[in-house]
Amino acid sequence: MPQASSLFTDVESSVVGTSAVVIYSPSGKTRKRFPEGVVEVYASEAEALAHADPAKHRHAAIASGPSRSSEGFKLFYLVRWLD
């Protein structure tokens, strides 16, 4: 049976992927999961970094998602910050 490459990404699955994103996070970089309404997906890390603006609480990151939570929300899970 194939092994997942990490806790957040299963290379055999097309359901949830890992993407370069910009996350609007006015509370800073302390959270690990974010609702889809504050996440913008980009084609590459460079593009996400170009659209980030830390002064406006918009941070570039790699995130896994979206996946549906038990409450029915679509969430992205932080893998790592890029900025």
Image (cartoon, helix red, strand yellow):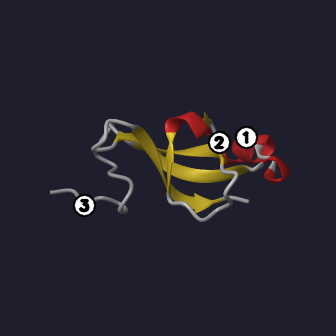
Which residue corresponds to the image point at 64% horizontal and 62% vertical from the top-left? 29
Going by the image, does 21 lie left or right of 9?
Answer: right
Say which amino acid is labelled 1.
Answer: Glu
Q: Callout 3: helix, strand or loop?
A: loop
Q: Callout 2: helix, strand or loop?
A: loop
Tell me residue 69's x, y (percent). 33, 43
Viewer-nearest residue: 2 or 46: 46
- The residue where tag 2 is placed is 44
Viewer-nearest residue: 62 or 73: 73
Tell me residue 2's x, y (percent). 21, 56
The residue at the far left in this view is 1
Tell me residue 30's x, y (percent). 59, 65
Tell me residue 60's x, y (percent). 69, 51
Which quadrant, please, contains the N terminus?
A: bottom left
Numbered badge on residue 71: none
Say which amino acid is labelled 3.
Answer: Gln
Q: Are marks 3 and 1 in contact (CB under 8 Å)?
A: no
On screen, residue 33 above or below 65: below
Going by the image, does 75 lie left or right of 31?
Answer: left
Write down the quadrant of residue 74 in the picture.
Answer: top left
Q: Are marks 1 and 2 in contact (CB under 8 Å)?
A: yes
Numbered badge on residue 47: 1
Which residue corresponds to the image point at 34% horizontal and 49% vertical from the top-left? 11
Q: Which of the two marks, 3 or 1, is nearer to us in this view?
A: 1
- The residue where tag 3 is placed is 3
Say which amino acid is labelled 2.
Answer: Ser
Viewer-nearest residue: 77 or 82: 77
Please report whichever mark, 3 or 2, sits nearer to the chain's N-terminal start: 3
Which residue corresponds to the image point at 73% horizontal and 60% vertical from the top-left? 83
Please report whichever mark, 3 or 1, sits nearer to the chain's N-terminal start: 3
Q: CA distance from mark 1 to mark 2?
A: 5 Å
